[in-house]
Amino acid sequence: MKNTFLTIVFAVFLVSSCGDDDGGLPPAKNYSIEYKVTASDGTTVNRIEYLDKNAERVVIENPTVPWEISLSIPAGKALEAKAFGDIPFNEDLSIEARWSPAIDGESSESQYLKNETENSVISNGDVEIEGRSLPRY
């Protein structure tokens, strides 16, 4: 009888200790994200878009550059930003994102667009940090 009681107590303990919702995985982390947009003097930056901590798109019209923001984004959300501008000949527009901790060994990305066509303007040209999911673990 004593062995049966101990067996039942042990079984109850095992079942109750296996009930973690996260399957025993470490807690989700937050990522530190920094976005930065720069442009040469002749470029007009028309718009910047990025995803906030709730994965909602934020749009900033006619920003002053250089422009930058730092965010804390929960794991499982997304990293994404884009800038649009009118770029005359020999001028440029760039966007950079830095994040921590690293994702698949990478911790930054940048895009650069320069107009190299004489007597032209790239109208509403864009540079983008393509969307990616921030791993949970």
Image (cartoon, rainbow, N blue to C red):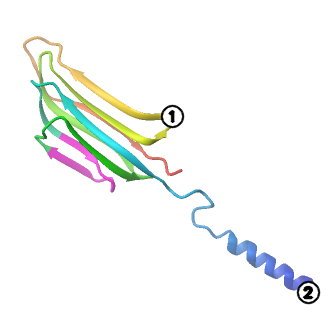
Q: Name which of mark 2 and mark 1 comes first in the sequence.
A: 2
The mark total stands at 2
Dominant secondary-structure state across the stretch colored magenta = strand
Residue drawn where x is 30% and y is 33% of the image: 96
- Residue 95 is marked as none
Q: Amino acid at mark 2?
A: Lys
Q: Nearer the viewer, residue 19 or 110?
A: 110
The residue where tag 1 is placed is 105
Q: In the rendered image of this protein, does residue 63 appear above or below residue 8? A: above
Quarter of the figure that contains the N terminus:
bottom right
Q: In the rendered image of this protein, does residue 89 appear above or below residue 67? A: above
**Residue 53 lies in magenta, yes or no?**
yes
What's the distance in space between the residues labelled 2 and 1, CA to CA? 55 Å
Q: Which residues are magenta?
A: 48-60
The residue where tag 2 is placed is 2
Residue drawn where x is 16% and y is 35% of the image: 65
**Residue 79 lies in magenta, yes or no?**
no
SS at circle 2: helix
Q: Which picture quadrant has residue 4?
A: bottom right
SS at circle 1: loop
Q: Nearer the viewer, residue 19 or 39?
A: 39
Residue 109: image x %, image y %? 37, 32
Q: Which picture quadrant has residue 108?
A: top left
Q: Amino acid at mark 1?
A: Gly
Looking at this rendering, what residue extends furthest in the top direction? 118
